[in-house]
Image: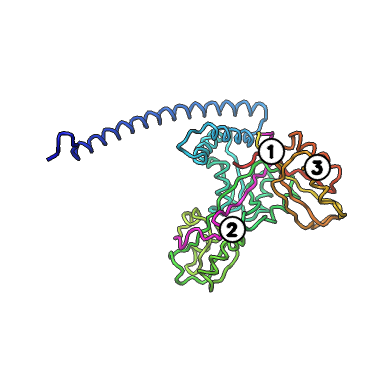
Amino acid sequence: MAGAGDSLPGDDAAAAAAELAELRAAIDAIDRELVERLSRRARLAQRVGEVKHRTGAPVYRPEREAQIMARLRELNPGPLSGDALEAIWREVVSACRELERRLRVAYLGPAGTFSEQALLRHFGSSVEAVACPTIDEVFRATEAGAADFGVVPVENSSEGAVNRTLDLFLLTPLSISGEVSVPVRQNLMNLGGSLDGVRRIVSHPQSLAQCAGWLDRNAPGLERAPVASNAEAARLAAEDAATAAVAGEYAAQRYGLQIVARSIQDDPNNRTRFAIIGRHECAPSGADQTSLILSVPDRAGAVHSLIEPFARHGVSMKRFESRPARQGLWEYYFYIDVIGHRDDAPVAAALAELKAQAAFCKVVGSYPRAA
C-alpha cells in the first residue's frame, strides 16, 4: 500500500495530462498571436510593394533581406538555432515578397539538384523555379529576362571551382547579387535499395569525384558514368533497375528511389557555394564581399602588383583563383573575392589603383556574404 506521501500512477498521469493541456493552450494562444502579427507584416509588405511600384524600385532587395536575417540572429535568445530561425523567416519573407510579385528564378535542373536546394535556401519556396539543363542556360535565361535571377554553382570545398561558371562570369553582363553555401550530403540510391543487379553508377562529374574513395572501396567493379546533374542521375536510376545514382536525399524523395548508403562523400564537411546572378546591383548591407576578375600583362612581378593595393588599403582577400585565358593577349584571368563592398572607402581606393594598372578589370558584383 502506498504511503501518505506517495503519489499513485493515476495521479501522475492526471497531473501530466493537466500540464500538457495547459502548455498546449499556451501554444495555441501564441499561434493566434503569430497569425495576427504575420498578417500585419504581410499588409505592411503589400504597402511596401505599392510604394515600390510607384517609384520603380525592385521587388527583391538582397541587401535588405540580408540585414533582416542578421538582425534576427542578433535578437535570437534560443533555444532555436540561428539557422533554424533564419529558415523559418526565409519563408515568411518569401511569402510576403510574393504579395508584391512572384519572382522567377533559374537554376541547374531538373528538380532535385543541390542547385534547387540552394534556390530554396536563399529565396524561399514562394518563387517560380525555372529548371535549366545547363549552367549556360541559367545565364542565358537570366540575361534574356526569362528569369529575374539565376542560381549557379561557383565552387566546392573538396573539388574546387566550377570552371564553366567562372568562364561565363567573364562574358556575362549580369552581376552577382548574393551567395549561399549548401552542405553536400551525397547518397547512393536506386530502385531496389541494394547494389544487387546494379551495373553502373551515374552522377554529375563533381559528385562522382567527391565520392571516389567510397566508391573505390564499396563498388569497385561498377561503371561510373557522368551525367548533366545529380537529379538527372536520379531520374535515370528511376527508369532502370541496373542503374544507381549519387545524389541528395531530396532527389531520392522526388524520384521514388531507396537509399542504399547515406553520406558517402569523402569529405564529411563537403559544401558547395552558389552565386545568385541578376541585374540588381546591391547597395551595402554591412557584411559584404566583392568579386573581381583581373588580368595583368605578362611581366615579372605583375601578380604581386595586382594584389598589393588590397594589402596596403587593409582589404582582406577571401579567394584567389586563376584560369587560363581563352582569348586576349594575356595568359591568365584571376578571380578574386575581397571582404567589403565596392563603395566602402578601402575597397574603392584599392579598385581605383587596380583599374589604373590592370590589363583587364571587371567587378562582377558586391553583395551580402553568406552567414
- Which of marks 2 and 1 precedes in the sequence? 2
**Vertical position of residue 153 compared to residue 363: above or below:** below
Q: Nearer the viewer, mark 3 or mark 1?
A: 3
Callout 3 touching callout 2 (CB < 8 Å): no
Residue type at mark 3: give it: Pro
Give the residue at the far right of this rendering. Answer: 299
Q: Is residue 229 magenta-colored?
A: no
Tell me if 84 is positioned left or right of 24 in this view. right
- Which of marks 1 and 3 precedes in the sequence? 1
Identify the residue under disc 3.
309
Residue type at mark 2: give it: Ser
Label 3 neighbour load within 10 Å: few <14, some 14-19, many 20+: some
- Residue 57 on image: x %, y %: 66, 31
Label 2 neighbour load within 10 Å: few <14, some 14-19, many 20+: many
Camera-side residue of 338 and 257 = 338
Q: Is residue 282 magenta-colored?
A: yes
Identify the residue under disc 1.
280
Give the residue at the far left of this rendering. Answer: 1
> Element under label 2?
loop
Camera-side residue of 368 and 44 = 368
Q: Nearer the viewer, mark 3 or mark 2?
A: 3
Distance, label 3 to label 1, CA atoms, is: 27 Å
Identify the residue under disc 2.
229
Callout 1 touching callout 2 (CB < 8 Å): no
The residue at 73%/48% (across/down) is 336
Highlighted range, magenta:
258-284
Q: Which mark is residue 207?
A: none
The residue at 60%/35% (across/down) is 65
- Which of marks 2 and 3 precedes in the sequence? 2
